[in-house]
Amino acid sequence: MPRDAGSGGAGVDPQRLWLASAEQRQGRRPAYTREAIITAAVAVADAEGLDAVTMRRVAAEVGAGVMSLYSYAPDKETLLELMVDHVSGELPTADAATGDWRADLKTIGRLQRAHMLRHPWLPAALATRRTPGPNTLAFLERALAALRPTGLDGAAKLEIFAQLTAFVAGHVAHEVTQAAVAESPARAAAQARYLAAVAADGRHPELAEALAAPGRAVTPEATFTRFLNRLVNGLDSDMGTELGTDLGEGE
């Protein structure tokens, strides 16, 4: 029985989803393609969020009966996997590693941020996704190549890429929320008044000191760059521990 929500059951079979050849259909040529269906689902998610993506809604967008979609994606879980990999095809993979793993990793982080800002539903989708498709694997290959100069083993490199992706996803989710707050001057002013009151109550001296410190550039780009630099530069000590050396030595 087709499922609209991705819960229960055995979940998506990645080998069948990504490696199996398309089954030959009998009778008339299909009126729709998987590509058209995924594109419609992505458009809905971009405009209205992930909750708006249902099999019924996507079917309406392409002008199909909902039951006809199940031969392309048997449930929403599968559709989500297809959507994530579809948009991952936008990420550039041809650029060669420069040999400076820190700079390359920061470039990858910036690319991921821009990508997730174009598709704000991605952070939530990535939190439940389990089966990387061909486009995702191509970008992962780029990241692993960038980390080759570290000398770390494969498991450690995979962990670093996962750590970077999780950081970017969490940051973008927060960034999108804050952008919505900024669009409401009254709400932003209320938050500022609240923090000022808390800082003045005498019970939060550390917070009061922090809020009184000179401000920094608070543009989304500047904030992300500071956080990204801390993450990537902070990997040196962890890598040195794993390798028994200090990767920052001699720089």
Image: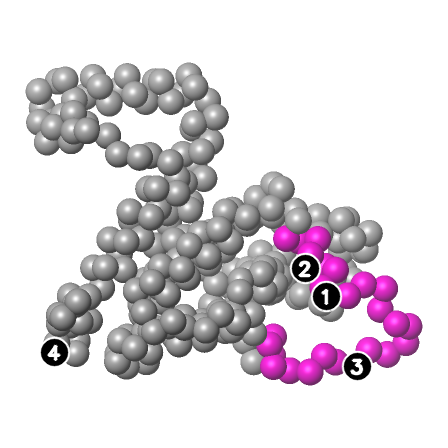
For the residues marked 1 and 4, what is the alpha-carbon distance in whole angstroms? Answer: 49 Å
Q: Quick check: is 164 in the magenta stretch?
A: no
Give the image's coloring scheme.
Answer: one colour
Q: Is residue 70 above or below residue 201?
A: below
Residue assigned mark 3: 24
The span picked out in magenta is 16-42
Label 4 belongs to which residue? 244
- Name the residue located 74 percent from the left edge and 80 percent from the top edge: 23
Q: Quadrant of residue 105?
A: bottom left
The residue carrying pointer 4 sits among few (fewer than 14), some (14 to 19) or many (20 or more) residues within 10 Å by Cα, namely few
Q: Is residue 77 visible?
A: no
Q: Is residue 49 left or right of residue 191?
A: right
Going by the picture, which residue comes out furthest to the right? Answer: 28
Near-viewer residue (100 or 228):
100
Q: Which residue is mark 1?
A: 34
Q: Quadrant of the N terminus?
A: bottom right
x and y, in percent, of residue 220 in the image: 39, 39
Q: Earlier in the sequence, mark 3 or mark 1?
A: 3
Q: Disc 2 to disc 1, how far (Cα)?
A: 6 Å
